[in-house]
Amino acid sequence: MEEVFQDIIIKHSDDYIINMGPQHPSTHGVLRFELCLLGETVKYIIPHCGYIHRGIEKMCEKNTYQQIIHLTDRFDYLSAHMNNEAVCLAVENALEVEVPERVKYIRTILAELNRIASHQLWWCAFGMDLGALTTFFYGLRDREYILDIFEESFGSRLLHSFNYPGGLMHDLHPNFQQKVKDFIKYFRKKLPEYDQLLTGNIIFQQRSIGMGYMSKEDAISYGVTGPSGRGSGFKCDVRKHHPYSAYSKVDFKEILYTEGDTFARYKARIDEMWESMNIIEQLIDNIPAGDYTAKMKPIIKLPVGDYFQRVETARGELGCYIVSDGNKNPLRVKFRTPNFSNLFIINKIASGNKIADLVAISGSLDLVIPDIDR
Amino acid sequence: MTNDQLKEKINGWISGLEFPENKQYLEIVVPAESLLKLSRLLRETPETLFDYLFCLSGVDYGKQLGVVYHLESTTHNHALVLKVKTDDRVNPNFDTVCGLWRTAEWHEREVFDLLGIKFNNHPDMRRLFLDDEWVGYPLRKDYKDDINIIER
Amino acid sequence: MDLNIYDFTSFTKWVDTALNSVMSPGWTMLVELVIVGIVFIAAYAVIGLYLVLAERKVCAIIQNRQGPNRVGPFGLFQTIADLFKLLGKELISIKNADQFLFNLAPFILIIASFMAIAALPFAKGLHAIDLNIGIFYMFAVSSLGVIGILLAGWSSNSKYSLIGAIRSGAQVVSYELSVGLALLSVVIFSGSMQLSTIVESQANGWWIIKGHIPALIAFIIFLIAGTAETNRGPFDLAEAESELTAGFHTEYSGIKFAFFFLAEYMNMFIVAAIASTVFLGGWMPFHLGGFESLNHVMDFIPPVIWFFGKTAFVIFIMMWIKWTFPRLRIDQLLKLEWKYLLPLNLMNIVLIAFIVLMGWYIK
Amino acid sequence: MNIFKYFGEVFGAIRSLWAGMRVTGYYSIRPGKVVTQQYPENRKKLVIADRFKGEVIMKHDSNNQHTCNGCGICELNCPNGSIEIISNKITNAEGKSERIIDKHIYHLSMCTFCSLCIKTCPSNSITWGQDFEHAMFDRNKLTKVLNQPGSSIRKEIKEVKETKEA
């Protein structure tokens, strides 16, 4: 077992320690990296988290299944819809409720829209981490279109608790389909601009190609999922391997890169935006008519047992593990959040690089801190 | 491998395993002392090759404390659930599996932080989210906090 | 007096004689120095403040935003309001900081940029000093600022500041070379180091046109190296807000921070002014040898406008670059200088020397 | 080092940089592409989606009547305890004792906008209001009483419900 503990950190008393965070522009929230520097080079990184731990899992134990859903918005707030979906699917599978086809289609479309919105925000923040400030505004500009669509249908832009065990809160807005089609048309024109501005840029390529190498074995062992893991060739797309909602009905590629560096993770996300648009285009015209929710009892009691639901959020695999003792409240709810696993590889892949690379690498992992702390 | 084949295979390795009913995954309840041995076999046997630990959760069942491991093989695409339980609520401890799956290191720290389950041979057994001075383990059912938890 | 906006020589002469007629030459000297000092401080403040505003507006438009638009029409008084805000802010004293150096650093930075601005020819005859080694002087003085940055980083007692300052030191020292060599190319063309002579030598066409390809290469290299020397994006490693929060001025607040801020923008102005003086003809209108009517039309526009117009153009290019590119890493920054800019520059100098020798430039 | 490769690198780099500068340059000369809105000025023409979750309100008709009978389901369903219902027991005209709502208290400061109260309301008496300007100087002002003073329960709805139950 000794050989696998190679990356265990050994501290020395004369280490030059810098605290990056909890308030730091490039940790994207209240995360603290304890860095040891050797000149510009980072010797080791110790992540410290828990600054915004809210005890959502404890709160879930006190709430009913309907009430859990709005709490799940709050961990990975950028992929709120997928988080909701995980709980809903877990509850529906436990009760063996067949949700209407319409709900499955709508959930898939919304998840993909949410994924695009999340990747847009990642793109702008990643550009900003590297010092290209203009990307931030271009990304936000295009994200606004999606948020407007969300606002019209769900009434809120970010934390839309739109899912409900058995279906949706209410039906879609009549303008929804047209607006989504308009957005796709618009965004297909704007996405090449992203490439011109950042992807092809020589400075950007120099800073990302070959930086922060993560091997496939590391990605699996550390449980790095999502585009970060797929940048290393880890086939971890839950949508493909364990299809849920309407993913089994659409034809899409699992984006895989084998380079495992910052640039591969970047490209994986950019390509995922294209792929998400393909998925939406396949579904948006075929939403079947029907009810927006299945018949559910007002008080949901899951049978005794434990239930696990895996969902692909914008950052990776989200697992919702519910242990039920037959009451209306769960006995234990555990969320396996993607960022929790993704964060801790940072010492492995970023130590030995420069401070500037650490910023780029942590940006390429697309960390959302509430998702780590829950 | 299908669940039945897996069950047959694993049952031959170690005695004392229980296979409770579970609709989703093959579920194994393993005695605490043979946890590490079984995990190592699951991880390293070429036919099983469970190389991806996708969830590690600590559960307070009321009387018992337990840890649940969700494992998947990325080559064979089969999954199983490993459960280990203890009645000892004062000083519960299990063997660490972070030598087999590196992600377990921080999941185990989280379990230690919130449920107070210690993991033997863990390289860095500190609290992850809470302060080091924090008293009690918040996710336990008998945890009392009169200020922050409002009972309804 | 006659104030001729095309030639300030007679105006400055008139001021000199008028002062000489009422007081002794020593006092005249002193009064003139005071007048020049006041004029420069006022110009410094106005140019600095409005450059900040211009940068905010330019980046806003690039980023599909409106930019400052609350204080005054189009936000014209925004930066002045900001200045008053900064004046009213508390000067936080840093524990364990080296107080003397900590307070000294912003002044070194600002004095360095003051000294550089003195030698700039704004228009014909509008010159504080016309040194016969003008370019050399500018080149020397503009690199003094790094001492201020190093002191600021060292004395702040902050690890972030120290890293920023050391980065800045390495950066400025290496890019000094490229700045010097790029300017040298025009010195070879014009045969003089005196700024007024260089400007006069462009009466029949700017050096960037007369010197065609090598001059263009020198101009681009000067722009890159000048941007790097002023610690502006994409070479803003000394500040690097996503890595070092604010680099060397992390710990500064209030008016001391404002000094750093102003000095940064003034350095940008100085680099742009040198570029426009040396490559784009300074206050010299757009002339082409042989097109008398065109030259005549161009002469109607006053030289001051030509000078500031060209400077604004160069500043716009610098802003455009800053708001497009990601930041370089420190080793890439040094690689760019030593592996690309310096060899290209040296080749360019040899080429220029050859061209001048053969007389292959447009006369 | 191959000299052609060296110059190829230089020109390739310049081309890639120029591609980026073209994008920003395109926008830098088009102030018409500005997308930001000037908020307090455009208040009058702001378009707020009609489903926008601003705050929970109770629907009142022109007679100052609502349909809330104070059943307390919203209070039960609220995950944060941001709804409190104070009801009175009165004796109605027929001599039966009846529960009517006295105060429907809503703590906006504790609300997480999950819309469970609205989804579960059996008499459909509360809904989302589109007001979004909630900034206050005093936290207590965020505690609101949803039923307007002097309002009463609408009779016909109650009768309809009663017949339904019967």
Image: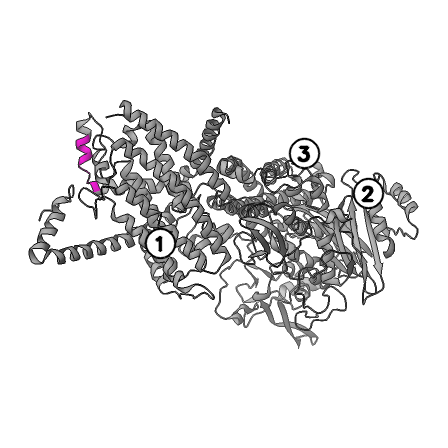
Question: For mark 3, what is the residue?
Answer: A251
SS category of the residue bearing label 2: helix
Q: Is residue C238 above or below residue D100?
A: above
Q: Nearer the viewer, mark 2 or mark 3?
A: 2
Give the side of residue C234 with respect to residue A305, left or right. Answer: left
Question: For mark 2, what is the residue?
Answer: B44
Frontmost residue, A252 versus A93 = A252
Mark 1 is on which residue type? Leu
User: How far apart are the alpha carbons under marks 3 and 1?
Assistant: 61 Å
Does residue A246 appear anywhere in the picture?
no
Mark 2 is on which residue type? Glu
Q: Which residues are magenta?
A: C295-303
Q: Is residue D76 above or below residue C340?
A: below
Magenta highlight on residue A149: no
Pinpoint residue A347: horizontal percent, then vertical percent. Answer: 64, 49
Mark 3 is on which residue type? Asp
Chain ID at mark 2: B
User: How far apart are the alpha carbons under marks 2 and 3?
Assistant: 35 Å
Discs 1 and 2 share one subunit: no
Give the side of residue A85 with respect to residue D37, left or right. Answer: right
Question: For mark 1, what is the residue?
Answer: C109
